[in-house]
Amino acid sequence: MSDAPEAGPGSGGFSLELGEDLVQTREWLHEFAVSVIRPAAAEWDEREETPWPVLEEAAKIGLYSLDFYGQQYLDPSGLGIPVTFEELFWGDAGIGMSLAGSTLAALAVVANGTPEQAGEWCPQMFGGPGDVKLGAFCSSEPDAGSDVSAIRTRAVYDAARDEWVLNGVKTWATNGGIANVHVVVASVEPAFGSRGQASFIVPPGTPGLSMGQKFRKHGIRASHTAEVVLSDVRVPGSLVLGGRARLEERLARVREGGSAGEQAAMKTFEASRPGVAAMAVGIARAAAEYATEYSRTRVQFGRPIGQNQGLAFQLADIAAAVDGKEAYGILEALAGKLDHLLQRRHGLRKDKRNHPHEVELAADLPKVT
Ligand SMILES: Cc1cc2nc3c(=O)[nH]c(=O)nc-3n(C[C@H](O)[C@H](O)[C@H](O)COP(=O)(O)OP(=O)(O)OC[C@H]3O[C@@H](n4cnc5c(N)ncnc54)[C@H](O)[C@@H]3O)c2cc1C
């Protein structure tokens, strides 16, 4: 293995420049967004449901698949997922969310689970053409949004039956209650806050898991977002992500005053955040394009409204923000950390260097070996 980092084409580290493969992937996704997502957007926005026919089309061409998303997560540039989500959300934010929702659950398993757990459960979150499936990641609760340490859902180990018993209410879960596989973050040792939490797989059809309220949203509507109620949900002891031995070791370290080393929900969020930033960029790009087109065609006082200076300046500022580095501010802000993580992902080390936008982030990208 080379001692030079592979991230970013021809660069010495993280770069926003796309390699030839990603340029082609972006064009392919853009074509899907133009020809399949956009024509379906209004109907599914109105229906406020998972757009199953769109997922089916995406599955047929290999887009809605573990293989495709896996490849993008593993792209050495770190830009595979941001590029993917930007194009899908440019098409329509709700349909984009439906196409992306299962990846969050899969990522939780990859980030926290063993390779065997990932191999068994991630494929069941996508299914295949003719049999499309969903995964749901359930972290948020009514009183635990950003503050995941406030999670109240409890996981209690029943040694006699070698089962975990889950109780609690999750909220804002994409695909919640309709997914094939749910990944639930729960507290094993409430006194330890987020250091006492673990993630659990809830297999299809497990008794006690049900959908609560389904949310009606102002945006991102062509996707299913709902509460998930867990009432004495029993799952096999082996379905704690990472395994019970690793969890016990971690809890023992915390009891002795040491560091947990990892936090279940945060490991998932840290790995998924660059993709969320890219979703926002895709939405902003689409909005700027719609606004520009409207300003060219809407005529008032005898001329297109865009020819008025006050409006033209605003549109120019928006276009510059979307096209230029400003729109990628969040990705850039993450660049220093991403650069570092990409090198760790590839088992590489390099001399410490300063990145102008480096920010402090606590956790790691998922293990990908
Ligand atoms: C469409 C959609 C889909 C979702 N899908 C999922 C899903 O699949 N699974 C899941 O678990 N959750 C999901 N969520 C929930 C999402 O993860 C939460 O909305 C998010 O974690 C923020 O939590 P909150 O909404 O409770 O906001 P809050 O935590 O209440 O934050 C409100 C505001 O306060 C700010 N804030 C909070 N704390 C601080 C601080 N310390 N310093 C400065 N500012 C702060 C926040 O940035 C935010 O602007 C989804 C949400 C939406 C809208």
Image (cartoon, helix red, strand yellow):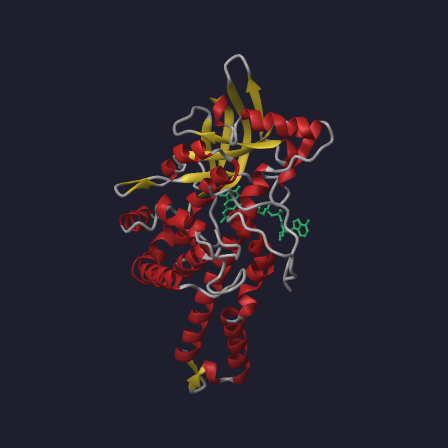
- Indicate left or right for 79 with 265 as reference: left
Q: Name, please, the residue furthest toward the bottom.
A: 302
Residue, x 44% and y 64% (percent of image)?
18
Residue, x 56% and y 30% (percent of image)?
168
Give percent across and percent down for residue 167. 55, 26
- Indicate left or right for 41 with 273 as reference: left
Counting the numbered discs, the total is 0
Vertical side of 287 occupied by 216: above or below: above
Give percent across and percent down for residue 357. 63, 62
Residue nearest the observer in this picture, 116 or 222: 116
- Indicate left or right for 253 with 236 as reference: right
Residue nearest the observer in this picture, 255 or 172: 255
Residue nearest the observer in this picture, 274 or 305: 274
Q: Is residue 271 visible?
A: yes
- Res 253 quadrant in image: top right
Q: Name, please, the residue furthest toward the top.
A: 160
Give percent across and percent down for residue 98. 40, 48
Give percent across and percent down for residue 359. 65, 56
Q: Is residue 234 visible?
A: no
